[in-house]
Amino acid sequence: MQIKLRKVGNSLGATFPKEVLDRFNLGEGDTLSLVVMEDGIKLMAYDPNFKQVMEAYKQGASKYRNAMRQLADG
């Protein structure tokens, strides 16, 4: 699926197909979270607790780095 960026004032905006909006229950005025990843970007419905969860993960991942590595290796 391709989404085209269009000029909106001094910014750029994107339009989403109706089936995507319906599937994720999105409408005008809703907020999305954009996460930058190594291979691209990810858009998600905004969750006000997301920032707190990510901070907790970062603290735990740093503190328990060796345990996380062992779990990942199986």
Image (cartoon, helix red, strand yellow):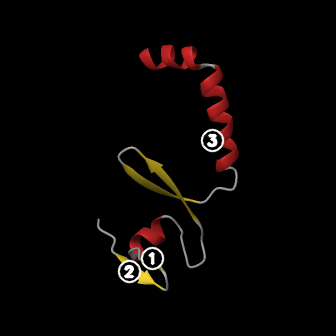
Mark 2 residue type: Arg
The image quadrant where one finds the N terminus is bottom left
Give the residue drawn at x 55%, y 76%. 27
Give residue 11's position: percent from left, percent from top.
48, 78
Quarter of the image where one finds residue 73: top left
Mark 3 residue type: Met
The image quadrant where one finds the C terminus is top left
Answer with mark 3 or mark 2, whichever residue precedes in sequence. Answer: 2
Label annotation for residue 54: 3
18, 8: nearer the viewer:
8
Mark 1 residue type: Gly
- Number of numbered labels in the structure image: 3
Quarter of the image where one finds residue 6: bottom left
Location of residue 54 with respect to 61 vertically, above or below? below
Location of residue 29 with respect to 42 vertically, above or below? below
> Where is mark 2, residue-wise?
6
Answer with mark 2 or mark 1, whichever residue precedes in sequence. Answer: 2
Give residue 23's position: percent from left, percent from top.
46, 65
* Contact? badges 3 and 2 (CB < 8 Å): no
Answer with mark 3 or mark 1, whichever residue precedes in sequence. Answer: 1
What's the distance in space between the residues labelled 3 and 2, CA to CA? 31 Å
* Contact? badges 2 and 1 (CB < 8 Å): yes
Circle 3 Cα neighbour tier, 10 Å, few/some/many (<14 / 14–19 / ≥20): few
Label 3 sits on a secondary structure element that is: helix
> Where is mark 1, residue-wise?
13
Give the residue drawn at x 61%, y 25%. 62
What's the distance in space between the residues labelled 3 and 1, CA to CA? 27 Å
Which label sits in the foreground, 3 or 2? 2
Give residue 9's position: percent from left, percent from top.
49, 86
Label 2 sits on a secondary structure element that is: strand
The answer to whether 2 appears left or right of 12 in the picture is left
